[in-house]
Structure formats: structure tokens, C-alpha cells
Amino acid sequence: PNHILEQYTAEFLRAYPSAKVLMATKDDLSADRRRTMLSRIATGDWDAVIITHSSFERIPLSHAYMEQFIGEELERIEDALRQMRSASRGNRIVKELARAKKQWQAKLLKRNRVAKAA
């Protein structure tokens, strides 16, 4: 979580005093400094890189990777749906899986729109 980044880093260093740790703050991953921080992360010899969840989401992934990932998630959901339907049980689970499938499909559609616009 954002509010305990420094505390978590301090506790990590207390547990591993000789570790080489890089703490990436929200400011380190702002639009103008993101490339520099990502280069430091990629090229450094770090034992740990500590970053908040919200900052981690700011690191862009390639369109191809995300498309592949979402496709794999959709396949897993489809497999689970087939298993649940063939077992004729878990109506609530089937509904949850269908809802998750729609959410992943919406994400894929949104990414495709953004990619075409770029």
C-alpha cells in the first residue's frame, strides 16, 4: 500500500541488513522520471525493488503481452465454465465466471481501441 512504502522498506532492511534495496516512490514513477527509474531497476544489481501497487500499475506493458495474457485468462475462464456446466452444479460460480469473462473481454476491447487510436 502507498502509505507504508517507507515502513516496509525499513522492515525489509532490518530483516536483510546487507541487501541492496531500491525503493521506488510515486514521484520516481511520474511521467517525466519513469524511464530513468525503470532503467535503474533493469540495470541495477538489486536484491529487492520495493514499489507500491499503484505505482506498479503505472509501468506500461506491451500491447502484445497484455493481449496474450488476457487471451490466456479468457481461456482459463472458458475451461472453468465448461467444467462447471458439465458438472451441472455451482450456478453462482457459473455466473461469477461469466461476469469475469465479460470484464476481461471489455479490457481486451478497450486495449484494442487504444492501440488502433495510437
Image: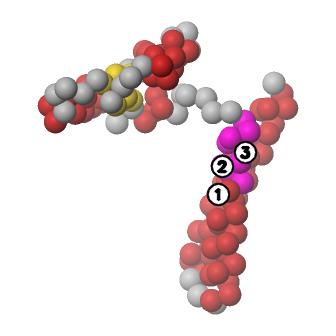
Identify the amino acid type marked 3: Glu
How far apart are the alpha carbons under marks 1 and 2?
A: 6 Å
- Residue 84, position as x, y percentages in the image: 62, 81
Residue at horizontal 51 percent and vertical 12 percent from the top: 36
Looking at the image, is 45 positioned above or below residue 109? above
How far apart are the alpha carbons under marks 2 and 3?
A: 5 Å
- Label drawn at residue 73: 1
Direction right: furthest residue: 116
Decide whether residue 60 is among the magenta residues: no
User: Where the C terminus falls, by quadrant?
Assistant: top right
Q: Quadrant of residue 87?
A: bottom right
> How many residues crowd around disc 3 within 10 Å: few (fewer than 14), some, or many (20 or more)?
some
The secondary structure type at the circle numbered 2 is helix
Instruction: Indicate which disc, 1 or 3, sits on the residue closer to the N terminus.
Output: 3
Residue behind mark 3: 67
- Residue 1, position as x, y percentages in the image: 34, 36
- Residue 57, position as x, y percentages in the image: 52, 33
Residue behind mark 2: 69
Main SS of the magenta part reads: helix
Label 2–label 3 contact, CB within 8 A: yes
Residue range corresponding to the magenta coloring: 63-71
Direction top: furthest residue: 32
- Residue 7, position as x, y percentages in the image: 21, 29
| Residue 23 in sight here | no
The secondary structure type at the circle numbered 1 is helix
Label 1–label 3 contact, CB within 8 A: no
Identify the amino acid type marked 2: Phe
Residue at horizontal 69 percent and vertical 60 percent from the top: 74
Residue at horizontal 51 percent and vertical 17 percent from the top: 39
Does 90 sit left or right of 115 as displayed?
left
